Image (spheres, rainbow, N blue to C red):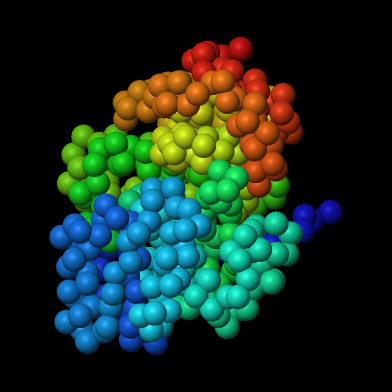
Amino acid sequence: MSPKANWNYPTAVKFGAGRIKELAEHCRALGMRRPLLVTDAGLAQTPMAQQVLRDLDDAGLGAALFSDIRPNPVGANLEAGVAAYRSGGHDGVVAFGGGSGVDMGKLIAFMSGQTRPVWDFEDVGDWWTRADPAGIAPIIAVPTTAGTGSEVGRAGVITEEATHTKRIIFHPKIMPSIVICDPELSVGMPPKITAGTGMDALSHCLEAYCAPGFHPLADGVAVEGMRLIASALPRVMAVPTDIDARSDMLAAAAMGATAFQKGLGGMHALAHPIGALFDTHHGMTNATLMPYVLAYNRSAIESRLTRLAAYLGLPEPGFESFQGFVLALRSRVGVPHTLAELGVDATRSEEIIAMAVQDPSAGGNPLPFTAEAARSILGKAFSGQVGG
């Protein structure tokens, strides 16, 4: 019998070097006259962000800046952003930056016209239908990192401070209407951020590809995304100004987020609570966990990884050759080999496990993601024992 599935694919993407200069034109196309530029505190004062504000001002648009955003954004950041949006009389959002800036920009636009708390719209069942779609402001996303792919996603991640839990807020209309992918904007990323975000894109493609379910469109996008990353990430680490490599990474990041509508898995189920509890970089956390989760899932994914290894041109294609590729890439770009090296406290493992098995990503793991599974993976990730 033919399988039944629901597929969604992204939005209008304006891809290429220098295309940030089109921003004002796209704002007007969406009816924005007073856009709020949302970005993180680190990016706000950079010449790049200031130039974007000047360009919007020169085009006669009444833009303002909001940047009170932590690297792992929390509810208070969102409340402040919505207040700034409303008090400034804004009519749309330009979500600018890495995952935190883009996610927060999307959520500010989403919440600008809602009356219920943001937690009422968590990605659980049909909770998204509680939202008033007329209260969602138009969104343009401009990524400056090549990692989360949030620019083509229908959700935003935010930490609930009271419980130290990362919540995924979902609504179809959180998808930005227009995305500007300009690889020149990512050239100034520090090497550590380039590595962490690049490995995040790999984790999205890889977990989506390994997730159970029938979604050959996502599988194809994920496989090609991984091929781009395997080639481009080492190049961009070696030569940060390599625009061709930056372009490939930016494309692969969007591909990862396009693919992971199929599902994620144990990497993300563990990385979300670890990030919430220890404020670790999300991409680096996924990358640290990657070989341990692959080893745990081996029996369910070996045939898939054999095909993937062949596509990537690895010698003697199989699980071992792909795991070797992952370990070599992690080492090359500076990913910590153990969670302890990442700054995670092993004495809080049971707390992490309790949160991980409840994480929405857990359901996409190729094998059942039980407390025993999480405990086994964490134990190996603290000891550094990949095999066995």
* Location of residue 44 by image quarter: bottom left
Mark yes or no: residue 366 visible. no
The image quadrant that residue 131 belongs to is bottom right
In-front residue for pair 65/264: 65
Most foreground residue, 9 or 335: 335
Residue 176 placement (x, y as % from top left): 46, 70
**Which quarter of the figure has residue 190?**
top left
- Lateral position of residue 232 relative to residue 258, left or right: left
Which residue corresponds to the image point at 64% horizontal and 36% vertical from the top-left? 356
Residue 138 in the image: above or below residue 290: below
Of the pair 62 and 149, the residue shown nearer to us? 62
Q: Where is residue 104 in the image (x, y as percent from the top left)?
A: 44, 61
Q: Which residue is drawn at 47% across and 35% down?
A: 278
Which residue shows up at 70% across the image and 64% down it? 127
Which residue of the protein is positioned furthest toward the right in this rendering? 1
Residue 183 percent across, percent down from the top left = 26, 56
In the displayed structure image, the side of residue 236 where residue 70 appears, left or right: right
Screen quadrant of the C terminus:
top right
Q: Judge whether 43 appears above or below 230 on screen.
A: below
Q: How many labels does the image show?
A: 0
* Residue 55 coordinates in the image, percent (x, y): 19, 75
Indicate whether 45 appears above or below 51: above
In this picture, is 106 found above or below 362? Answer: below
- Frontmost residue, 343 versus 306: 343
Report the residue at 41% width, 54% height from top. 100
Quadrant showing the N terminus:
bottom right
